[in-house]
Image (cartoon, helix red, strand yellow):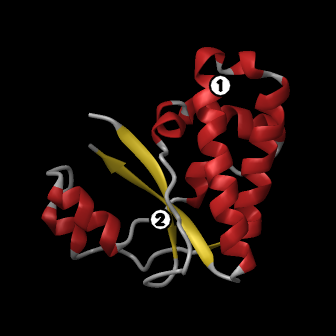
């Protein structure tokens, strides 16, 4: 079962493509968290929030307990500029030091650049975002 860390932008349709693959980021989340802390930025999972849509996906995939859906807190939304600080710091470091993730550096960089594209659009539209996780 593969996990994916993807971006949710507030609102029904933000008016732009928010797709990010997120599988390489999810596979390497532990290493990326340590790296973010070393770089002095928030780890990506600190932007995580569960919402009804992501919980519905988990229920559909048989991962979540249906009782969870009845006790979900309100989704947390984050300023896109704060996410950009993390994503850009990780991109900058891994571009110079790809050995930090070995053969996973290139797929992670591709996905971090997807995150950067979506977060720049999100910031430009004045919207907020969070990370969600899916297992397939």
Label 1, secondary structure: give it: helix
Q: Where is residue 129 in the image (x, y as percent from the top left)?
A: 58, 70
**Splitting the image into 4 quarters, where does residue 85 fall?**
bottom right
* Circles 2, 1 touching at the beta carbon (< 8 Å): no
* Residue 117 in the figure: left or right of residue 17: right
**Placement of the C terminus among the 4 image quadrants:** top left
Percent of width and height locating residue 95: 80, 30
42 shown above or below 92: below
Q: How crowded is mark 1: few (under 14 residues within 10 Å), some or many (20 or more)?
A: some
Q: Which residue lies furthest to the front in this view?
A: 16
Residue 49: give its label: 2
How many numbered circles does the render carry? 2
Residue at left 47%, top 49%? 5
Residue 64, horizontal then vertical, whole percent: 20, 55
Among numbered discs 2 and 1, the one appearing first in the sequence: 2
Please give the residue where the numbered disc 1 appears in the rendered image. Answer: 105
**Along the viewing direction, whichever of 134 and 16 lies nearer the viewer:** 16
Q: Residues within 10 Å of mark 2 (few under 14, many from 20)?
A: many
Residue drawn at 33 percent across, 35 percent down: 2
Secondary structure state at the residue bearing disc 2: loop
* Quadrant into which the N terminus falls: top left
User: Which of these two is toward me, 69 or 54?
Assistant: 54
């Amino acid at each position: 079962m593969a996990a994916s860390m993807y971006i949710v932008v507030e609102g029904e349709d933000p008016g732009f493509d928010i797709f990010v693959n997120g599988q390489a980021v999810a596979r390497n989340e532990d290493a990326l968290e340590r790296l973010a802390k070393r770089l002095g930025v928030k780890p990506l999972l600190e932007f995580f929030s569960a919402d009804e849509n992501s919980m519905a996906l988990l229920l559909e995939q048989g991962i979540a307990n249906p009782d969870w859906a009845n006790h979900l807190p309100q989704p947390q939304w984050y300023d896109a500029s704060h996410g950009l600080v993390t994503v850009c710091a990780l991109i900058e470091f891994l571009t110079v030091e790809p050995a930090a993730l070995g053969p996973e550096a290139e797929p992670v960089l591709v996905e971090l650049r997807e995150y950067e594209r979506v977060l720049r659009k999100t910031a430009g539209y004045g919207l907020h975002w969070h990370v969600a996780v899916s297992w397939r």
